[in-house]
Amino acid sequence: MGIINTFRTADSGQRTVLVAVRSAGALHRLLDVLPAFDGDSRVVTRFTLVPGSRFDVDALSALDRAGARTLPWEEALRGAHDLILAASPKGELRRLSGPRALLPHGAGFNKTITDDGSAGVPSGLDPHYLLADGGPWAGLHALAHEEQVSRLERTSPVAARHAAVVGDPTLDRLLASAPRREDFRDALETGPRRLIVLTSTWGPESLVSRRPGLAADLSGLLPYDSFQLALVLHPNEHSDTGLFDLSRRLAPALSAGLVLSRPHEEWAALLIAADAVITDHGSTALYAAALGRPVIDAYDGGHELIPDSPMARLLAASPGLPAAPELPDALRAALAVDTRTLAAGAFSRQGQALTRLRHHLYRLLGLTPPPGPVRTRAFPRPSTAPRRPSAFAVRTEVSGERITVQRFPAHTREHVHHLAAEHPTAGQREAQSASVLWRRAQDTAAHPHSTAWTVWTAGGWTAHALAESPACRTAVAVLTPRRCLLRHRAAGLFSLRLEPHRDAGRVSYADPAAVASAVHAWLGTGASHAPPVSLLCDTGAITVRVHLETAVADDLDYEL
């Protein structure tokens, strides 16, 4: 992380903007504002970490990853700055010298923080922090909606003198990124499933504090091939807990395929990709609502939510989720709620935020803004890949030559037909108990420096699996997304040919392991197994046809 010794360069025609950061969450908000200075060599940006927040650890690492040039706090105090940007008025910020612009820390000013500032006053609109020596702390208090100005006038008329409605730059990024929804879903391996995103703020009333087992409960109830789950946590929760402990606490849900978003930017990609959002009282859900996503209320109540705030109104209009099994009913009810209208109370001037901010920030800098429009950056493609479960508890229903398959994590309490496990990644207990074992073909390019190696053929491995695993009734070698070799202990060998699901010009593939469980269930009914046979397999969101044929030599000899 670079250290800069000089920060005021006005004598050279340049201006230095000091970005004063207290936490990772505040930094992320400010990074969304900085494109207002894009393309202007007159503006130099420096960062400093304001002491006093227990959530500052991740801010340091985020600055380092961004390649930001930083000033030590004591050095930042020694002179005047051309402009100071902050997303929180708390801490020792007032000790910095220079014009100040205060940006919102979130959306809607919906929470009051117990034992921090004035009781019952929204965090971010508290005169305890907004005034210094009786006057406004900031030369610009940028707000996202006229209603916020009205609330600020009620709590602090003096601070409201420098308030301006500019819109929300983070929402503008979301709206600009919305066309990338399919790309984001592809990165998350969502496919035709419904993506349900849980969002949690931080603190004692948050979703992860009040209902820490909700993600695991939902993963045990929702069929894997119909639903995907993701969790968006407030950056403060990431900072306070750390990825190691978060992964440990969420281990059952993560092993079932839960996507845990990274704190910077990836949360936005998840909201864009989502089909519905389950939330507490954190303002992230307002962004989801502005995108038109159905919202489900999982807030258990408390003292933090400000009555009649935009978030309070959104939760009041949204169906509740008292317990995980009630999600299907809540989803149906949520689809009937017009969330965009409810979110409109938190966001105005949509698509205009950076243009308006540029006007105000350059006024404070004493410069004329550069010509041309400001470009709103789209959010990047998510990079967190979900973990594929290595074992499933499988429920099947056979009706003639049509089979319905629902797969759940091995820890589910749902009534199921059999256990299926992947070789060699499943745990020993699941592998020894599984009625169906499957193995996926590996790319031989994984051994580029080997002079020799040994591999199984599909025929050899399926025979070995049945011989070594007395509980196993069916062994399946997944050769490609459309080809499998299946060996059943009683019915014998089959080549499987899977047709993709086609709908309106789109092609979807079922997981061959799910289709293998369907064929296993059908073979167990005692029906005539003489190939060729054509079966329909319902695997969650799609239905595919599978053809059972006499095993062919190319499949038997396929190298795994």
Image (cartoon, rainbow, N blue to C red):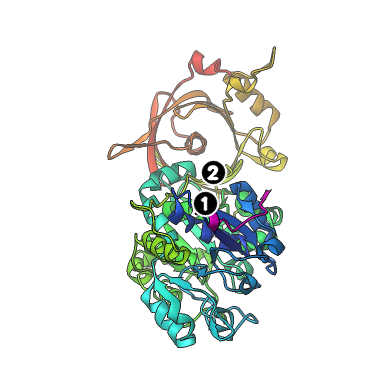
The percent position of residue 48, horizontal first and vertical second, equals 64, 60
Q: Which residue is mark 1?
A: 266
Report if residue 19 lies within the magenta region.
no
Report if residue 8 lies within the magenta region.
yes
Binning the other alpha carbons within 10 Å of mark 2 as few (below 14), some (14 to 19) or many (20 upward) gives: few
Left or right: 219, with 333 as reference point: right
Q: Which residue is mark 2?
A: 383
The percent position of residue 84, horizontal first and vertical second, equals 55, 65
Query: Can residue 539 be seen in this snapshot?
Result: no
Front residue (pair 81, 505): 81
Going by the numbered disc 1, the residue's amino acid type is: Glu
Identify the residue at image location x=54%, y=56%.
11
Q: How many angstroms separate mark 2 from mark 1 (CA)?
A: 8 Å
Q: For residue 284, which numbered disc appears in the image?
A: none
Asked if residue 137 is positioned above or below residue 409 in the image, the reply reads below
Going by the numbered disc 2, the residue's amino acid type is: Ser
Residue occupying the far front of the picture? 11
Quadrant assignment for the C terminus: top right
Front residue (pair 465, 184): 184
Are the residues at dot 2 and dot 1 in contact (C-beta closer than 8 Å)? Answer: yes
Front residue (pair 335, 238): 238
SS for dot 1: helix
Q: Image quarter for residue 387?
A: top right
SS for dot 2: loop
Q: Image quarter for residue 173?
A: bottom left
The percent position of residue 337, horizontal first and vertical second, equals 34, 68
Binning the other alpha carbons within 10 Å of mark 1 as few (below 14), some (14 to 19) or many (20 upward) gives: many
- SS assignment for the magenta stretch, majority: loop
In the image, the segment drawn in magenta is 1-13
Mark closer to the chain start, 2 or 1: 1
